[in-house]
Image (tube, coloured by chain):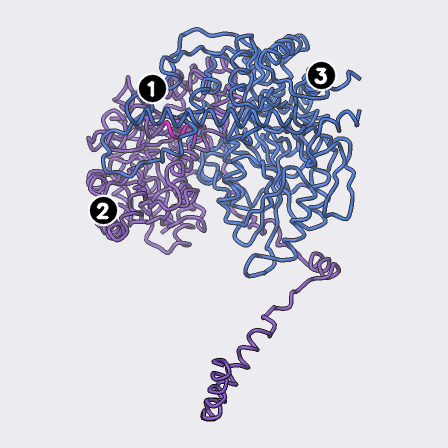
Amino acid sequence: MDTTWELYEMFQAFLKAPSYHLALEAFLMVWVLWLIFHKSYKPERLELTEKEKEELIAEWKPEPLVPDSSKNHYALKPRVVSGALGKKITVNGTECLNMGTHNYLGLIDSPEIKEAAVKGLRKYGVGSCGPRGFYGTVDVHLDLEAQLAEFMGVEEAILYSYGFSCMPSAIPAYAKRGDVIFCDEGVSFPIQKGLSASRSQIVFFKHNNVEDLERLLLEQDDLDKKNPKKAKVTRRFLVIEGLYMNYGDVCPLIELLELKKRFKVRLFIDESCSFGVLGKNGRGVTEHFNIPVEDVDLISACLDYAIGSYGGFCCGSSYVVDHQRLSGLGYCFSASLPPLQSIVASVAIDVLKSKPELVEKLQKNARFAHKELQRLTKLLVCGDEVSPVKHLRLAADRAEAQQLLEQIVDHMQEEGVALTVARYIDEEEHLVPPPSIRLIVSAILDEEEISSVVSLLEKNSDTLL
Amino acid sequence: MALERRKNGFVQKSSNGFIYPKNSPKRIKLDDKSFEHFEETPLYVAILTYLCYAVLTIFGHIRDFMRRNGLVESHSAMEKDRKGYVPLYHSFESFYTRNIYRRICDCWNQPIGSVPGAFIDVKQRVSTDKNWHFKMTGESIRVLNMGSYNYLGFAQTDGPCADAVEESIHHYGVGVGSTCHELGTLDVHIELQALVAEFLGVEDSIVFGMGFATNSTNIPTLVKKGCLIFSDELNHASLVLGCRLSGAVIQVVKHNDPIDLEKKIREAIISGQPTTHLPWKKIIIVVEGVYSMEGSIAKLPEIIRIKKKYNAYLYLDEAHSIGALGPNGRGVVDFYGCDPRDIDLLMGTFTKSFGAAGGYIAGSKKLIHHIRIHSHSAVYANSIAAPIAQQIVSAMEIIMGKDGTGIGQKKIQQLAWNTRYVHDNLRKMGFIVYGHDYSPVVPVLLYVPTKIAAFQRILMERGVATVVVGFPATPLVESRARFCMSAAHTKEMLDEALKVIDEVGDIIGVKYLQHKMNKS
């Protein structure tokens, strides 16, 4: 009974309804039906036939594996050195005074080191034939690690077989995706590789500019305050060099340390150029500024330069360093340093310890050379007084400067001084330093030799420019 | 014989010369040289292994709990003076290290006190705090060395190589202190690079001071964004790192499986780059010659066929194969009798067969010129030290027979004979041995993580040094021991070692091979 009544009412309502209402209802009804029954949009699947696939494969032509390289590139006609790279070197048959290689303390030539190397050879052979894990740990490696740790006044040191692979292995061992690394924009190439291997967020600050770093750290601090949950798990690092390879200047460590402590960032210092060079005993930049070494989280350095051997090391507290023994790629998966090179490094450290006057002489020479080089009117000497790495730059545009500097180096070589233009891969560098002659002062030079080199430089730069 | 092997239940990925592709229309019969053994893990062993890990993990958590609550002393290094800093690494990252690896870590990093020749002096260590710290006792034991990659026995303290190296030390010193773009190119480098090219039968070569870095710093100079890399799933960490740093897209292919490779290459060329669908700029296949963990040898002829068919480039890492494979010691290329010019990049290291250090890349002049100019290692890293280079030159000349003594050829033959001899005998004893009969590294499967420690320790006690590897270097259930062959071993030494290995295998019960091979 009720139902019929309702149906009747509905019919009445239908009759009374205005026509626009009916039109709308009809439209909605049609739309609902359309929505239900229309075929959902399916793009036509582009199924390629076998023939088309074959055609695509046949059509694909790759780029050549490598582009043609210019036949005149300097790397294809390297200057060949025959004999030791000591105080004197023979470049392309000409004997020259060596002011181009990083033999800061002049240890490469020293007879006691050669003797130790031969002894090592006769006991251990040349190669270690295995990574550290698999019988590639020779007792002399452990000795050297202990010696380095003791020398630097830290708990532990870890030895790498290649100086270039220290930082690229150490940085990604700690810094992961999501972490933040503050880095000086003037750092050398191995550090840049470490940064990109870490996949962390990289924030570059202006070279040796503490204010700029402070600004960036404050920015990060603001971000952290907005998202404290994320900040709690975001590791923050500060990566710098003790003495900059590409600029020859010392980092402002005291100010940087203040910031490090204030913002609680981890400080990693690459001391490749400052180890065995700065400080009273050659312990590097921490000794130079008289700062307790524990304040720095990790120090790395290569053994190629002042030490005159091969490879590199990282050092710091056991908590930090030990982690690399399983996480440092270049440590775990690479053959260890040939024992004889390890022995050479050990002996060199002994020399460094017993003859601090060597370091003193180096610093004295560096200061003297700096003063002398300031005599030059055409070339600008860059870097700190105390640094044995001096960059001589020109006020000219890049290409022109590069060419002129190469000419100066060539002339100097003809007159018996081996120098080198600093080499970079321009397209790969974060910030290509301006072209320069990288002149290196060593402890085995005397003041007369330095003066005569500067005079020659003056003569050559004056005639060329 | 074939039936016997079939019963062992090898996995399909690498069968006895035949590959039965599921999706490929063709059946490929590979040369008999590609035969490799990969027996399946017996079920009961797999269960035992998982059980073992379960027990270790439970105990690990209990110990962690106790450490946290000060019930037991914690030996792990603590941070000092860094309050408020975000921890440098997470504790879960090191759960495995702390609770499993630490218990057996005396099996690795044992210091040696001699040349890694046929015998080594292993320095004895003791730990009073459950392997957290070691103290040297000052004593050492002399054991047969089956753990160093001294394939051709050039790890020597005397003989023509060592004499030449001594002379080189006197002449050049040990350090270089410059890169080869600046003042670090020595005449001995030029000699070495020419010799490497001659040895490998290609136009030119370039050498670097570290094998790891040869891969990790040079792959980025060859491939960039928009390129595609096909990388074998078991490639070495250095190759993986190099590929990652390059910025190219990386596709992982199944281990030593040309069919998977071909399938993926076809798909990649057809579909182009992801999202943009632009064609790939270039495709490069990255493989190793010998995989030291598996003992497998790359199926090079198949890979070369694929590479040529699809216009891809081939990067071959011969770290473990150069010197150790082939009738002339020229690596996997020589082993299969392939043309070295079919491989675009030949890479290898000098650490293993040559008893030195460093690595090379060899190939066409054009390629090497490009690398010489753009390689990160060539521009920024110190060039290889003269005495090390001299060792390589001397060893390579001996291998090539340039010294006129025939010692090189003898070494190559001795290594090949030793390898076969050990392979055959281990299988006859009932061990599961992975890989190729000619692989100079012989992996023996132990599966259970506690057994790897027992195997290593007891063998060491009885005078044989070997290398054991477990997770994470291998899959979780496939822990193994590896015996490294060397031309420095004589048959008598190997017989003695095999006898010991046989005994130890019985003691700890790792002879898992269910169907022993006939003596035929």
- Is B24 in front, or is B11? B11
Q: Secondary structure at mark 3?
A: helix
Q: Nearer the viewer, residue B271 or B12?
A: B12
Q: Point out the frontmost of discs 1 and 3.
A: 3
Depicted A292 relative to depicted B507: above or below: below
Q: If the image is split into quadrants, where does the C terminus of chain B sit?
A: top right
Q: Which residue is mark 2?
A: A210
Label 1 amino acid? Gln
**Inter-mark Cα distance, 1 to 2:** 34 Å
Drawing shade for chain B: blue
Q: Which residues are magenta?
A: A322-326
Question: Would you name the residue on which mark 3 appears?
Answer: B428
Identify whether B268 is placed above or below A75: below
Q: Secondary structure at mark 1?
A: helix
Quadrant of residue A37 within the rendered picture: bottom right
Residue A74 spot, x, y in % from top left: 50, 44
Point 38% across, 25% down: residue: B62
Secondary structure type for disc 2:
helix
Q: Residues within 10 Å of mark 3 (few under 14, many from 20)?
A: some
Mark 1 crowd level (few <14, some 14–19, many ≥20, 10 Å Cα): some
Chain of the residue where label 3 is placed in the rendered structure: B
Amino acid beneath label 3: Lys
Residue A323 highlighted magenta (yes or no):
yes
Judging depth in this view, the residue of B457 and A325 nearest the camera is: B457
Q: Are marks 2 and 3 on the same chain?
A: no
Q: Chain of mark 2?
A: A
Q: Residue at x 29, y 19 (%)?
A: A353
| Chain A visual colour | purple
Task: Please check whether the numbered discs 1 and 3 fall on a single chain.
Answer: no
Residue position for label 1: A147
Which disc, if any, is residue B350? none
